[in-house]
Amino acid sequence: MFDYIKANQDLVQTILAIVFSVSLLILSILAYKYESRTKGNGEKIKKMVTLSILAAISVVLYLFVKFPMNWILPFIPGFLDVQFSSLPVYIGGFMFGPISGTLITIIRFLVKLPNTQTAGVGELADFIIGFASVLVSSMIYHHHKTKRGAIIALISIVVSWTVTAIIINWTFILEFYMNFFGFDAIFGMLTTIPGITADNYMTYYILIAVIPFNLILSSLVSIITYIVYKRLSMIYRDIHINKG
């Protein structure tokens, strides 16, 4: 099996990318039915203001509040940063639905893009991960609005986030960086990974860096979401906007 994948890597990557893209498209179509419908101008204004605040917080966290994972785990490449900009994404998705959560990821992506240091690919990767995971988790939560449903939704964040990270890194992210910035420059950043060579770099990068990094980060974000979401949703429900 592994020999076949290695021998036909380009074909397998292309098929996987197509299947993944079609799956996201189907999820996007299904997500619409799970979006909360607001009635009345007061509720619409309250929702718009809340989404604007969540998007602003997400952007600030994305731009300014981050640190390299290798401060904690030295074998993780230094370009993989711990940042919590996805937290407002999931809160928005849980409050209002997957479309609202996706809107926050789009705003975060567009604001960061002009100042990219990765030719836009790093931002695109973060967008795809946020897009996929907020669709899945918000749909689950809005279908099962119970404590058990919330826990399953939070677990789905970890699973969908990590699986998406594996797929996009294997299909195009790492190869793009190596082609754009040069193999030696990027491979030099990967040498913190024990046992990595020019022959096994993709496998080692996925297994030793991508999977642990994304499992840890997504778990932290999920735990924080669990802690703060209920409190924020109660505050939101208690806010009343009077017309006129």
Image (tube, rainbow, N blue to C red):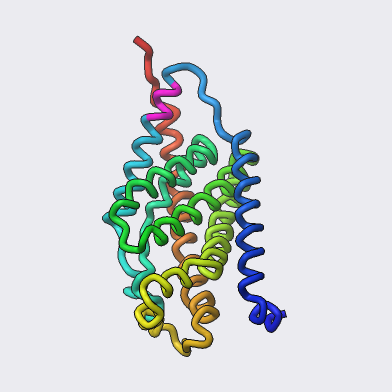
Q: Please identify the quadrant where the C terminus is shown.
A: top left
Q: What is the quadrant of residue 71 in the picture?
A: bottom left
Nearest the viewer among 31 and 222 is: 31
Residue 31 point in image, percent of width and height? 60, 40
At horizontal 37% and vertical 83% (from top left) the residue drawn is 184
Relative vertical location of residue 146 with respect to residue 169 in this rendering, above or below? above
Task: Assign the magenta stretch its main secondary structure.
Answer: helix
Callout count: 0
Residue 57, by quadrant, is: top left
Residue found farthest to the right: 1
Residue at image coords 38%, 33%? 50
Q: Can residue 230 be seen in this view?
A: no
Residue at point 48% right, 49% down?
226
The location of residue 103, given as percent across then percent down, is 45, 40
Query: Is residue 107 shown in magenta?
Result: no
**Residue lying furthest top:** 244
Q: Is residue 1 left or right of residue 200?
A: right
Depth check: give the residue in front, 182 or 232: 182
Specify whether residue 57 is in view: yes
Residue 222's x, y, as percent? Answer: 48, 55
Quadrant where the image shows the N terminus: bottom right
The span picked out in magenta is 43-48
In the image, residue 235 sits, relative to residue 45, either above or below, namely: below
Magenta stretch containing residue 46, yes or no? yes
Pick the residue in front: 141 or 14: 14
Q: Is residue 42 left or right of residue 128?
A: left
Whether residue 208 sits left or right of residue 30 in the image: it is: left
Q: Position of residue 188 (x, y in %)?
A: 36, 83
